[in-house]
Image (tube, helix red, strand yellow):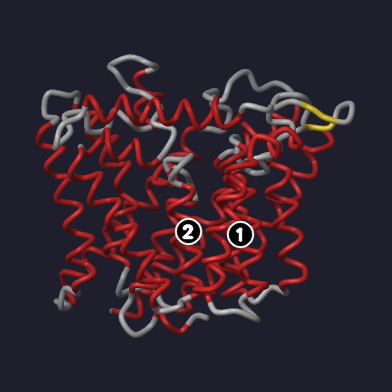
Amino acid sequence: MVINVKQAIIVIGAISVSLILFVNLGEVVALVKGTLHSQTQNVTPVYVKVLKDILFLISISISLIWLVLSCRVISPIKVLLSAWLFFVFAALIASYELPWICLLLGLRWVMPIILLVLLIDLVDREAMVTISNFLKYVFFVHFTFQLVQLVFGGTWYGSFLGGYSLRNPGLFLIPSSGALFSCLCFLFLNYFAKVRFSVLAPITILSVLMTVSLTGIALGFLFVSYVYFRRFFSSRVIMLFACIACAGLILSVDQFAHLLGRGDDVIAVSGGARADIFLDTWGRVGLVSRFFGLATNSAVLYFNGNYNAFIADSMYVSVLANLGLLGFLFYVFLLSFFFVWSIFISHDFSILLSLFIVLSSLTSVITELYPINFIVPFAVAFVLRPGLGLNVR
């Protein structure tokens, strides 16, 4: 039964990766043709988009049934992760006055975390290799779409050099989402698909540059530099230099953004707006939130700006608003623990994965960003599985 369940999880993972080719296809084609009116416009049939939620539910159901029937000993790491789900339950109960659809959207928001807990004993190296092999072809299509958008994408996200599209999201509608996907593909393809670094690195850098996403560009250069210099230095030395480099980047980011065409005040506008949202949310929520589900992209689309639903614009704000102060502080503790643990054991893939989660959470609600919200639980479950995750270097 264990083998059959593992094979089923591998198949679902492969299908989930491949599904990104179709989930946003209508919107991406409309973007190139110049017929897309807004980022909330749905062009792709709804039944195609619903497939990703069905895959989540199937994965959670299969994993949960296997966990119950296998009677496995609950590991300490599962207890730690499950403790965070206690805050989800508390916020769900405290938000009983909200419409039931809002609570369902909140549960949809937390599904990737539930899946992560259930996958820890199921994801092995075979699963990671299989997913990486599918990602290899999807990444090629994503990069090809970016090149097409560069030439024919129009001025939806601005233009440069007399007509070339400034920001090119590839298979996605939001450029930053495309950049994060490229960075995640680099991780998987470098460590599991064994794609030549000399080929993978320049394609990844070009891909993130074409999105003009500052977070994506920072992650892309950080990942490529880490893998290259890891041949000569320890992970701890590289992380020390990375911290110094990040400090320098923060000090010069406005000048760098100007070169990319993002304007001279990107930190004041983008970073300042997110800081204001965070501080405003911090002042409104209590120890346990009574707004579970409202700080999700799905709620914004469903309620169409009504019922106090708002765009969190970062995972940290989303956790704070949906769960409250206690759930937020525990989330930060889990991320910090994962990052420090990764550095302590000098586990290269885990270090970069933890950095990806920490940094991407600054500008995206990653539990709602498909297929990243499906791939990351697989990756974290792999490195947290006792006696297996440490096989990757």
Q: Total marks drawn? A: 2
**In percent of the image, x 21 and y 65: which residue is there?**
65
Q: Amino acid at mark 1?
A: Leu
Find out whether the residues at labels 1 and 2 contact each other: C-beta distance under 8 Å.
yes
**In percent of the image, x 46 and y 66: which residue is there?**
11
For the residues marked 1 and 2, what is the alpha-carbon distance in whole angstroms?
A: 9 Å
Q: Position of residue 356 (x, y in %)?
A: 49, 56
Q: Position of residue 178 (x, y in %)?
A: 61, 45
The quadrant holding residue 12 is: bottom left
Q: Quick one: quadrant of the N terminus?
A: bottom left
Q: Amino acid at mark 2?
A: Leu
- Of residues 110 and 272, which is closer to you in this image? 272
Q: At numbered mark 2, what does the secondary structure look like: helix, strand or loop? A: helix
| For marks 1 and 2 on the same chain, the one whose residue lies earlier in the sequence | 1
- Of residues 237 and 190, which is closer to you in this image? 237
**In percent of the image, x 56 and y 70: which residue is there?**
238
Any mark on residue 355, and which? 2
Any mark on residue 222, and which? 1
Above or below: residue 43 compared with residue 181: above
